Image (cartoon, rainbow, N blue to C red):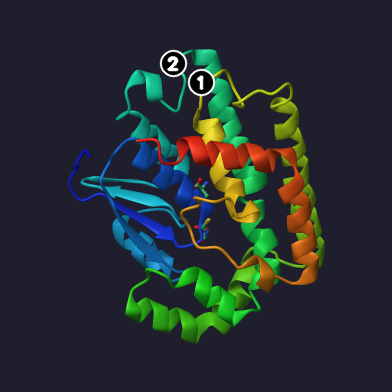
Amino acid sequence: MLELPCMRLLTFAPSHFSEKARWALDRAGLAYTEERHTPLLHRIALRRVGAGHSVPALVLSGRVLKDSPSILQFADEHLPPERRLYPQDPELRRLVQEYECKVGKEIGLSVPRWAYFYLLSRKDLMLQLFLPGVGRRQSLLFSWLLPLIRFLMRKGLGINPISTRRVEARISAHLEEAAQRLEGGKLYLFGDRFTAADLSLAALTAPLLETPGYGGTLAPFAELPEEARRTVEVWRRHPVAAYVERIYQVHRREF
Ligand SMILES: N[C@@H](CCC(=O)N[C@@H](CS)C(=O)NCC(=O)O)C(=O)O
């Protein structure tokens, strides 16, 4: 394992964007300390290190990487050419980067909006999801401030029944498109190797599918309302679910 001084990865326990970053750092064999925070209170820690307003953020000595694509690119610099996440071929590299950005918008940003519609009002599930690994003081504060945090998150993310149907349709459409890309028994989204595109699609959909090996916390399926369970069941039967499971089995711990 390569030791670079002072690497800290700031995350939320259930965050799939954080899982993306963890996966790439693990793949590159880079040692880091994960520091978990909770929504809204995380902004204090991020401001202190000069990051943006979202997790993951990777704090290195002298600089901060403020989002998952820059963390993947940094990790990639520490991988041998045959295990890189971004292809050497410029055209293929462009396609992979374009896809990483697209799946971040269409699945990445939609998953929390969809899930919070069902979870925000459940204090027990919110604490179960967000508190593992968080410091004692922040845990108490999060638990105490949850009604306010819930209100601000609902308002800030525009969570309501109509937006929930909209993000649900966006997730389903993206899964369809990915399935088409994989048609004909293709193992990977681009070219014949595992790339940042596969890592991104797998990490960002895994919490919806409860894929074995997912490194973040998950809301227990049985605790979800019936309506949410029905949607998740449809997604779990989608051909992309089997692809995500295989990508996790083969590539999540291959180092
Ligand atoms: N484009 C960013 C998106 C990260 C993102 O949306 N993170 C969520 C958690 S999964 C977050 O920090 N939300 C809180 C906020 O934006 O205040 C990335 O790829 O890292």
Q: Which quadrant is home to the C terminus?
A: top left
Residue at 58% from the left image edge and 75% from the top image edge: 125
- Observer-nearest of 126 and 226: 226
Residue pointed to by mark 1: 93
In the rendered structure, find residue 88 and report the number of the disc placed on it. Answer: 2
Other-residue count near label 1 (Cα within 10 Å), few / some / many at <14 / 14–19 / ≥20: some
Helix, strand or loop status at disc 2: loop
Q: Is residue 163 visible?
A: no
**Residue at image x 52%, y 69%?**
129
Distance, label 2 to label 1, CA atoms, is 7 Å
62 or 141: which is nearer to us?
141
Nearest the eye: 88 or 214: 214
Kindly tell me whether mark 1's CB lies below 8 Å from ligand 1: no
Contact (Cβ within 8 Å) of mark 2 with mark 1 = yes
Vertical placement of residue 247 versus 36, above or below: above
Where in the figure is residue 100, as x and y percent of width and height? 56, 35
> Which residue does the image show at 48% across and 58% down from the upper left?
216
The quadrant holding residue 126 is bottom right
